[in-house]
Amino acid sequence: MKILVADDHPIFRKGLVEIINASEKFRCEMEAGDGKTALQLLRDTAPDIAVLDISMPEMNGLEIVQQASSEEISTLFVILTMYKEEEYFNEAMDLGVHGYLLKDNAVTDLLNCLQTVAKGQYYVSPFLSDYLVRRSQQQLSLNSKVPSLSQLTATERQVLRLIADNKTSREIADEMHVSHRTVQNHRNNICQKLGFKGHNKLLFFALQNKDSL
């Protein structure tokens, strides 16, 4: 399987490449030291899996995932991070990342992570497993209280999460690379499915349940 590794620290990146190329199943054919180069390689070569540092010059790893998603690039993503904050983890999961790996554990966990992600499954550094459990519990609780959430499309869920970040329709449109009218249509559809009359009620609901969306 073709792997792209993007990290702005050459020595660390080289170590990851050596680990990947020592395996029989994976081959690192592409490297990048900044986000824009990584995104262009994704567009040009469509690797099976991309391992992206969350913090890079030009574009960070999460921005790359978001842009790749909007362009319907089929690559599966693994995020490398030094941050143990739950907020970053939730953002990565919201974007559909399949692997979330702490840099402290990357050397020992990388191949296990790639093998799991290659099967279409999710891999999270064991240190962060509590985040995943808590996230699942919160989502299940909210879904049981508001069953109509299951009617939302993936795009509508993304819009709802961005509303929960208190972003305007214009800001959401810019981030999702769609028109302002498209975002307004999504908001109207969400209100209709959830039974809200008016965008103010939608904003209040999103803010109140931000951690569970």
Image (cartoon, rainbow, N blue to C red):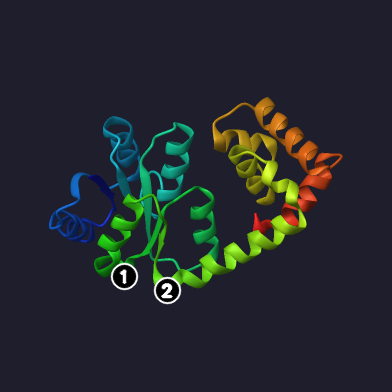
Q: Earlier along the polypeptide chain: callout 2 or callout 1?
A: 1
Q: Residues within 10 Å of mark 1 (few under 14, many from 20)?
A: some
**Helix, strand, or loop for circle 2?**
helix
Towards the viewer: 189 or 201? 189
Please determine whether, in this image, residue 20 is positioned above or below residue 41.
below
- Quarter of the view holding residue 21: bottom left
Towards the viewer: 3 or 165? 3
Is residue 167 at least partly visible in the picture?
A: no
User: x and y percent of residue 183 in the render?
Assistant: 67, 32
State left or right for residue 202 relative to residue 5: right
Residue lying at 51% horizontally and 67% vertically, measured from the top left: 85
Q: Are marks 2 and 1 in contact (CB under 8 Å)?
A: yes
Quadrant of the rendering where the C terminus is positioned: bottom right
Residue corresponding to mark 2: 127
**Helix, strand, or loop for circle 1?**
helix
User: x and y percent of residue 87 in the render?
Assistant: 55, 62
State left or right for residue 198 relative to residue 48: right
Quadrant of the rendering where the N terminus is positioned: top left
Amino acid carrying mark 2 in the image: Phe
Tell me the number on the disc at residue 105.
Answer: 1
Residue lying at 35% horizontally and 38% vertically, measured from the top left: 39
Residue lying at 54% horizontally and 68% vertically, measured from the top left: 133
Is residue 129 at least partly visible in the picture?
A: yes
User: x and y percent of residue 136 in the render?
Assistant: 58, 63
- Quarter of the view holding residue 4: top left
Q: CA distance from mark 2 to mark 1?
A: 9 Å
Amino acid carrying mark 1 in the image: Asn
Tell me the number on the disc at residue 57.
Answer: none
Please determine whether, in this image, residue 83 is positioned above or below residue 169.
below
State left or right for residue 60 relative to residue 203: left
